[in-house]
């Protein structure tokens, strides 16, 4: 399934928000349960209509669902809600029972998933991936989960190509993410895929989180909070963001921190999970996406303003990152919102590009 299947409906056909159903399982983490509601509950169209409808359901009749905290939550919908879902998100749970132990669905979980319509987009956060795996939906496909659980997932489901080193993987109609905050990255990525960078960035700004962490960024970063006794690369990153339209040399970035190129490169990767070159390319792709969506500048001008130098260079980078040309991207998210084309998110339709 492509993202074209999930574009919001054209006004002429009658507006209906994209229905996101969150499956709440006993032993769930309240934080992760709340992520989809926070992220998908924000986006609106130009008329102020919500682009998504978010519903929480259980595998049982409406009622309480236990959490891993000292409280339960009341879920107002049973498994019948899954039948009308456009996207289903499965947060993690610490009480998956035979799903986690043996890779086998419980009867009630199997019955609930049987209600899904063909073509429903599926996503998991952290150990929610075990549900998708036990249902056979990940066989022969790439997937990820929390790094601490990745080896076990691979042993239990040897047909899955488990990648423990990435934040999330987009494999078209099935998406998986690492734990906790990576669920935010995944949900923002889905909004970006459905409605473009401008809408996703607005949601991120209102949620006070980074607007974009690439799926291929490492889960575990050696020094995510710089040691106050050690020099950071924050100043260099801010300096570079202010002049993306200019040629930026690695030595110039290192000079902002008074470091050697070798030391700067090592510190940069420790703090961001990617190399300076990869980071610059990511920032320029995001700048180009924003300009293509929000301005009428020519493709040549966008390429210069984003720092790619030429339209050909920008086209190559957008093709590598998204699988579309700049012109097609602009048409998708500006003039063709009711006729979206597929936006690929990385190599082999996967956002998990190696870092």
Image (cartoon, helix red, strand yellow):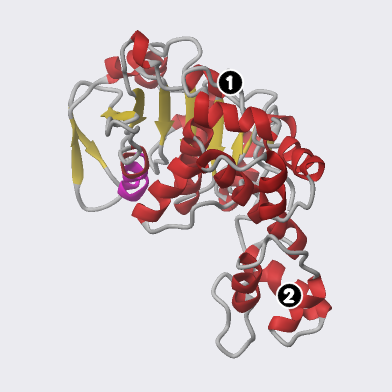
Where is residue 75 shown, x and y percent of the image? 20, 32
Q: Which residues are magenta?
A: 29-36
Residue shown at 42% from the left, 41% from the top: 92
Image-based side of 111 in relation to 295, left or right: left
**Residue tagged 1:** 2
The 10 Å Cα crowd at callout 1, few under 14, some 14 to 19, many 20 or more, is some
Q: From this viewpoint, is residue 173 visible? A: yes
Residue 153 inside the magenta-drawn segment: no
Place residue 317 in its image quadrant: top right
Is mark 1 in CB contact (under 8 Å) with mark 2? Answer: no
Q: From this viewpoint, is residue 126 visible? A: no
Residue shown at 55% from the left, 46% from the top: 290
Distance in Å between CA atoms under marks 1 and 2: 39 Å
Name the one closer to the observer, 157 or 257. 257
The 10 Å Cα crowd at callout 2, few under 14, some 14 to 19, many 20 or more, is many
Where is residue 91 shown, x and y percent of the image? 40, 38
Where is residue 355 shown, x and y percent of the image? 73, 53
Residue shown at 55% from the left, 36% from the top: 176
Quick check: 52 above or below 258?
Answer: above
Helix, strand or loop for the magenta stretch, by majority: helix
Q: Secondary structure at mark 2?
A: helix
């Amino acid at each position: 399934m492509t993202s074209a299947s999930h574009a919001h409906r054209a006004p002429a056909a009658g507006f209906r928000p994209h229905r996101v159903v969150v499956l709440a399982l006993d032993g769930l983490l309240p934080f992760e349960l709340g992520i989809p509601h926070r992220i998908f509950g924000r986006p609106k169209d130009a008329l102020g209509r919500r682009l998504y409808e978010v519903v929480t359901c259980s595998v049982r009749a409406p009622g309480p669902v236990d959490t891993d905290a000292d409280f339960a939550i009341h879920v107002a919908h049973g498994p019948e809600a899954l039948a009308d879902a456009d996207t289903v998100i499965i947060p993690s749970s610490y009480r998956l029972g035979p799903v986690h132990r043996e890779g086998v669905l419980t009867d009630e979980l199997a019955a609930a998933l049987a209600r899904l319509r063909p073509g429903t987009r599926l996503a998991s956060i952290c150990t929610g991936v075990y549900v998708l795996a036990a249902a056979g939906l990940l066989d022969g496909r790439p997937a990820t989960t929390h790094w601490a659980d990745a080896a076990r997932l691979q042993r239990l489901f040897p047909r899955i190509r488990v990648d423990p080193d990435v934040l999330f993987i987009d494999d078209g109609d099935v998406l998986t993410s690492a734990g906790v905050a990576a669920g935010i990255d995944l949900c923002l990525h889905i909004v970006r895929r459905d409605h473009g960078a401008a809408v996703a960035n607005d949601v991120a700004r209102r949620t006070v989180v980074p607007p974009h962490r690439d799926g291929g960024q490492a889960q575990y970063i050696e020094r995510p909070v710089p040691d106050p006794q050690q020099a950071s690369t924050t100043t260099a990153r801010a300096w570079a963001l202010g002049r993306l339209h200019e040629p930026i040399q690695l030595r110039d970035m290192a000079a902002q921190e008074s470091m050697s190129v070798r030391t700067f490169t090592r510190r940069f990767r420790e703090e961001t999970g990617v190399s300076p070159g990869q980071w610059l390319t990511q920032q320029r792709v995001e700048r180009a996406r924003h300009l293509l969506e929000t301005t009428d500048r020519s493709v040549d001008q966008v390429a210069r303003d984003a720092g790619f130098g030429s339209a050909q260079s920008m086209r190559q980078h957008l093709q590598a990152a998204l699988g579309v040309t700049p012109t097609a991207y602009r048409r998708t998210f500006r003039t063709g919102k009711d006729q979206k084309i597929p936006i690929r998110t990385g190599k082999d339709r996967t956002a998990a590009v190696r870092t």
